Image (tube, helix red, strand yellow):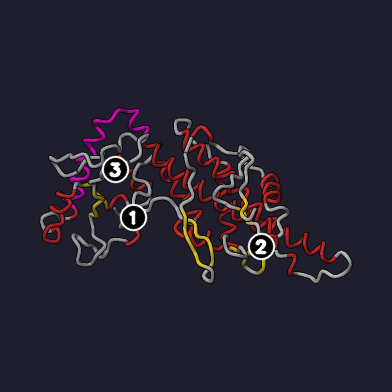
Amino acid sequence: MVNLRIEVRKMLWGNAGNRCAFGGCSQRLVSNLESPGQELGMHQRVVGEEAHIRSSKVTGPRHDPSYPTEDLNEYANLILLCPTHHTVIDKENGRAWPVAKVVSMKSTHEAKVDAAMSDDSKDRQQLEVALAARIDRWEAALDLAAWEDLTRRLNWVHPYLSNSEWQSLAETASWLAGVVWPPQYPKLSAAFETHRAVLDLLVKHILDSFVLDGDTYTIRRRHKEIWFGGADGEQRYTEAISEFGINDAVTGALIHELTRSINLVVTAVNEELLPLYRFNDGSLQMIEGDPLWGMWSSHPRYEPLIWEMFPKAYDLSDIKERVKSELRGGDPRNGRSLNIRSFDPSLSAEPRAHAAGQ
C-alpha cells in the first residue's frame, strides 16, 4: 500500500465506498472496512490498491513533470481500484487511460457512492476525515517516524534528547490537553487521555531530572559534578548516585509506558476509525541497550488489552517512590535494576516485585 497520510486514506476509501472505482466493477476491496469495530484479522485480505492517477516515476503511467511532487500522494491524485483494473489503466503506460479519463471515472464512481449514502453516513464520514487529520497532526508532532531513535537515546546508559525533541513533546502534551474526542469514539478518547497523561509526566520528569547543556538535555549526574569529601562524603555521594539511579529507572519506565500508550492509540484508531491504519508498519518499536553491550527492540503493548481499565492515571511522585523502594534506595552499586516490562507506573498498579537481583 502507498505511504499515505491517514486523512488521505480515510477520504479515499470512504468516498469510494470500499469499492473499485472502475466502471461496472464495484468489487468490495476489504471485507470489514465498513465495520471499524472489528480489527483486520490474519485470515482477512485487503485487495484494494491505492493507485496513482499521475505516476511519480518519469517512465510511469500518466507521469506529468509539471505536477507538484508534494501532491503526488494526496487525495486528488489517487483512485481506489481492484488489482485487475489497476493493471488495466496502467497497461501500455496508461495510453488508453489518460489523466482526464481516470479523473472522470473516479468522480463518477464517488458521485454514485455519495448518492447512495444517508445523511447520517455522510456526517460520520466528514467527522472521521476530520479526526483522521487530527491523527496526522499528532503523528507529525511526535515525529513517530523517528520514534525508535528517541527511545534509544532515552534508554541509553546516560539518557539524553535534544531540546527540540523536548519542545515537541511539551507542545504535543499542551495541544492534547485541549483536545476533546467525540463520545461515539470512547476507545480513542481513553487511549489519548492515557497517552497525554504519560506524556505530561515525561515532560515534567525531564525538566526536573535533566540538565540542558547547549541544545541537549542530559540526565543529571550529581555524583559526578563535585568531590564528596569530609566525614559525611560517602553518605552524600550515596544520596547523589541513588538520585541518578532512581531518575534513570524512572526515565526508562516512562518511555516504555509512553510507547505502550502510543500503541494503544494505534489500536484505538484501528478499531474505531480506520482498520488500515499502520497496516504495513504495525506497532511502534522501542530500542534499548547501547552499541557496546548490545541493542534490542521490543513492541510495548498493554497485554491483555482490557479497555475497561482505561484511561489510566499517573503521579510522578508515586512512581519515584515505588521505583526507589524496588531498587532499595536506587544506588546502582547494589546490583538491582528495574524490569520496565513488568513495572506498571499507573496509580491502579498492584504492589508486586519488578526489580532484578533480589
Look at the numbered disc 3 and give the secondary structure of its residue.
helix
> Which segment did they paint magenta?
100-124
Percent across and percent down for residue 160 are: 60, 64
**Position of 107 compared to 157: left or right?**
left
Q: CA distance from mark 2 to mark 3?
A: 46 Å
Q: Are marks 1 and 3 in contact (CB under 8 Å)?
A: no
Q: Quadrant of residue 222?
A: bottom right
Could you tell which of marks 2 and 3 lies nearer the N-terminus? 3
Nearest to viewer (mark 2 / mark 1): 2
Which SS type dominates the magenta stretch? helix
Q: Are marks 2 and 1 in contact (CB under 8 Å)?
A: no
Looking at the rendered structure, which numbered label has been put on residue 179? none
Residue at which label 2 appears: 219
Say which amino acid is labelled 2: Ile
- Residue found at the very far right of the displayed protein: 231
Percent across and percent down for residue 358 are: 65, 53
**Position of 166 compared to 24: left or right?**
right
Look at the numbered disc 2 and give the secondary structure of its residue.
strand
Look at the numbered disc 1 and give the secondary structure of its residue.
loop
Percent across and percent down for residue 31 are: 26, 38
Image position of 330 with respect to 31: above or below: below
Image position of 235 with respect to 307: above or below: below
Label 2, residues with CA under 10 Å away: few <14, some 14-19, many ≥20: many
Say which amino acid is labelled 1: Asn
Q: Quadrant of residue 247?
A: bottom right
Label 3, residues with CA under 10 Å away: few <14, some 14-19, many ≥20: many
Residue at which label 3 appears: 13
Viewer-proximal residue among 177 and 302 = 302
Percent across and percent down for residue 350 are: 62, 38
Which residue: 80% across, 71% down?
227
Residue at which label 1 appears: 3
